[in-house]
Amino acid sequence: MKTLLIAEAGVNHNGDIAMARRLIDVAADAGVDYVKFQTFKAERLVTADAGKADYQKQSTGKTENQLEMLRRLELDRKAHIELIEHCKTRGIKFLSTGFDIESIDMLVEFGIDVFKIPSGEITNLPYLRHIGRNGKPVILSTGMSDLNEIGAALNLLEEAGTPRDRITLLHCNTEYPTPMIDVNLRAMLTIRDTYNVNVGYSDHTLGTEIAIAAVALGASVIEKHFTLDRNLPGPDHRASLEPAELMAMVNAIRNIEQALGDGIKKPSASEAKNKAAVRKSLVASRAIRHGEPLNESNLAVKRPGTGISPMRWKEVIGKIAPRDFAPDELIEI
């Protein structure tokens, strides 16, 4: 099964449309399925006095509030149209997280084919209901939530009109970057088994190994932040992959997908040719004369594996040698 890979550009364009276009280029070169941005109007998202998260304070300074920070990071209607067209040119799908109902409606107008719901909206009833009514596939991040909150959001989406088989739940931790001790990757499997849904992982750890491990555990979707340069100013750059790292992660995940295989234990085509060289056969441990009984004293087990299998040991013991055998010669009966 191919994992759906979402490269999260988010707000790492810093409000610069040219930088946003370069992020699309990086994502396309890396071979991901979607490049994802964020669609919002700052005044609809936060109050005038809303404070920033600690990680945002560390990366953007403490003097401004959320509203001031987000105003610089908005993408307007014209920017969306330009970025969608650039995605088409580069052969990559455009995706954006809409943070309010008006933004969702604009994305629907642009023909978005899947809704990506961020962790912060998992308790936003009118927002979830509005998305659910569209009936499109939904990818819902579950950071900061427990199983009861996840179940409530899932029920809302279903009741509004989106069937469960069109919903994928992403295990997620919203600390940027997420400490390894807080990843709790097995929770992804708990979510899957509790709600019988497709699951994936939205990764905010440093590096790529946790996203790769999630695929090995069965994630059907991986979302990962990326940037042009981790040293750029802005709230999410420090916890994002740089271009070469994004490409390495994609390559590793595609290798993991192949390596997982079909689960049937059998010799592979590449290894079948090694049987003769590395398996063993029954051979004469010394010279054996025609008519002599075969027993523990005149038999040995050695490579190659082109003769009688040692698993037939009991069958061979006591048989009469049909001819003379030289030392190390493969036994025949």
Image (spheres, rainbow, N blue to C red):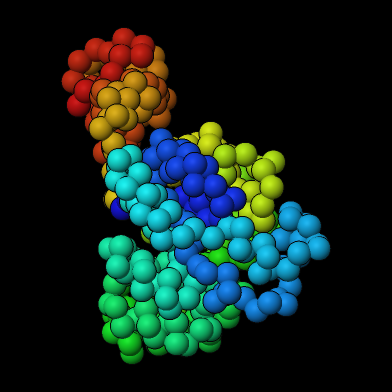
- 320 in relation to 135, above or below: above
Question: Horizontal and vertical percent for residue 11?
Answer: 56, 55
Question: Height in image: 175 above or below 321?
Answer: below
| Residue displayed at 56% across by 62% down | 185
Looking at this view, is 231 or 81 the one in front? 81
Residue 17 left/right relative to 330: right
- At horizontal 39% and vertical 72% (from top left) the residue drawn is 104
- Foreground: 326 or 184? 184
Which residue is rendered at x = 41% and y = 35% of the image?
Answer: 29
Please indicate, yes or no, whether residue 192 appears anywhere in the rendered image: no
Q: Position of residue 2 (x, y in %)?
A: 32, 51
Residue in the image at 56% along x and 65% along y: 172
Q: What is the quadrant of residue 155 in the picture? A: bottom left
Dividing the picture into quadrants, the one containing residue 62 is: bottom right
Residue 149 percent location from the top left of the image: 53, 84
Out of 271 and 185, give the one closest to the viewer: 185
Q: Nearer the viewer, residue 269 or 307?
A: 269
Say above or below: 248 vs 32.
Answer: above
Q: Would you say 248 lies left or right of 108 here?
A: right
Image quadrant in which the C terminus is located: top left
Does residue 46 appear to the left or right of 78 in the view shown?
right
